[in-house]
Amino acid sequence: MNELLNKLVENNKNLTIDGKVAKYIPALGKADPNELGICVADIEGNIYTAGDYNKKFTIQSISKTISLMLAIIDNGIEYVFDRVGMEPTGDAFNSIIKLEIVSPSRPLNPMINAGAIAVSSMIKGNSTDEKFKRLLNFFRKISGNENLGINEEVYLSEKETGDRNRSMAYFMREAGIFTGNVDEILDVYFKQCSIEVDCIDIAKIGLFLANGGRLPSTREQIAGENIARIVKTFMVTCGMYNASGEFAINVGIPAKSGVGGGIMASVPHRMGIGAYGPALDDKGNSIGGCGILKDLSRNFNLSIF
Ligand code: DON
C-alpha cells in the first residue's frame, strides 16, 4: 500500500505546477507549492503514508465539519438548521451574494464561510477562550492528537486581513442569525481555521466520520451516528465548494477541502484519507490532492455511488 501511495504522489506531482498557493491570507502565501502528501487510516487501525504526509499545514475550512459536529451536540439539529441551510450554493466559498438574495437571510450551508461563522457562534462557553478551548479539545479527541494547537502567524494574518468574513458576520448579525460581539465570534472562527495538522491528523478525523462518530481505537461514541451522517452528506454536496458535483462524479468520496491545501476524506465503514498539497485550483481545492484522491478511488473502488 505504501508503495502504491508513493506512486500516486509521484504521478500527481506534475499537477501542482498548474496550482497556486492561497495568498489572500498573507501567511499562507509562504507555503511550498511543490509539496504533496497523503495518509490513509483504515478501520483495522493501519496507517499508510507517502510524500509530505508529515508536513504541518493549517486546517482552514476542513474545520467547518468539526465545528458543525460540536454546534449540533451543543444545540441540537433543529436549532442549528433553523439558522443555517442545507443547500449547495454554486458560488465561491467566500461569496457574500446569497446572504442578501435569500429571504429571510440565512447562509445556505455550513461549509461556506458565512455558514461556518454562524456555526462557530453557536459553540457554547462562558467566554471566547472557553468556546475555543472546548472546540480545540474536541479536535484533539477525534484526531487522537493531544498536541494540536494553532499556528499563531496564520491566525493573526487572517484576523488582520479577514474583512470579507467580517462583513458577512455583521450582515448576519443584522439579519438576526446570531447576536453578540462580532469580533469575538470571528475570533473563534479564525482560530479554528488556524489549527495546525498533518495528513495523519485529518485522515484520522475522516476515519472517525467513516466510523459513524465513534473513536476507532476505543469505540467511544463522541458524536451521534446521525451527526456523522449529516456531516458526510454535507461533504458530498458542499465539501469541495463549487466543484463538489465534479468531485462527486470523479472521486465519489465525501470530502472537505481547506485553502491551507488539505483535503479530509471519509469512506464510510472503510477508511479516512488525508491529502495535502498547498497548490490550489481556481476553486480553492488542492490540485494535487484531488488528483491523488481520484486515482486512489479508482484503484480501490472507493466511490460510494
Ligand atoms: O475564512 C477563510 O477564508 C479561511 N479561513 C478558510 C477558507 C477555506 O479554507 C476555503 N477552502 N477551500
Image (cartoon, rainbow, N blue to C red):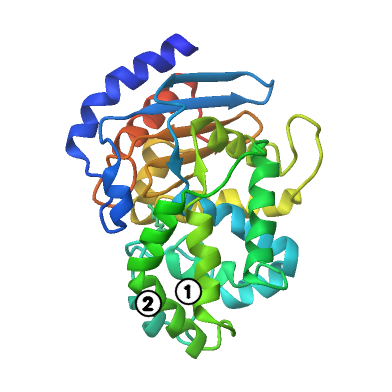
Residue 209 at x, y = what percent?
A: 64, 42
Crowd around label 2: few <14 · some 14–19 · many ≥20 (10 Å)? some
Q: Secondary structure at mark 1?
A: loop
Q: Residue at x 43, y 19 (%)?
A: 50
Q: Residue furthest left?
A: 18
Whether the residues at callouts 2 and 1 have beta carbons within 8 Å, the answer is yes
Q: Residue at x 27, y 35 (%)?
A: 32
Label 2 vs label 1: CA separation?
Answer: 7 Å
**On screen, 84 above or below 18?**
below
Res 166 quadrant in image: bottom left
Q: Amino acid at mark 1?
A: Pro
Q: Residue furthest top?
A: 3
The numbered mark at residue 98 is 2
Q: Is residue 126 left or right of residue 9?
A: right
**On screen, 228 above or below 253?**
below
User: In this orientation, does residue 235 appear?
Assistant: yes
**On screen, 32 above or below 181?**
above
Res 76 quadrant in image: bottom right
Residue 249 at x, y = what percent?
A: 39, 41
Q: Amino acid at mark 2?
A: Lys
User: In this orientation, does residue 305 appear?
Assistant: no
Residue 139 at x, y = what percent?
A: 63, 47
Ligand 1 contact, mark 1 (Cβ < 8 Å): no
Q: Is residue 197 left or right of residue 27?
A: right
Question: On the rendering, which quadrant does ligand 1 occupy?
Answer: bottom left
Q: Residue at x 41, y 49 (%)?
A: 258
Viewer-nearest residue: 217 or 105: 217
Q: Is residue 274 left or right of residue 259?
A: right
- Which callout, 2 or 1, points at the residue further toward the start of the chain? 2
Viewer-nearest residue: 247 or 27: 27
Residue corresponding to mark 1: 107
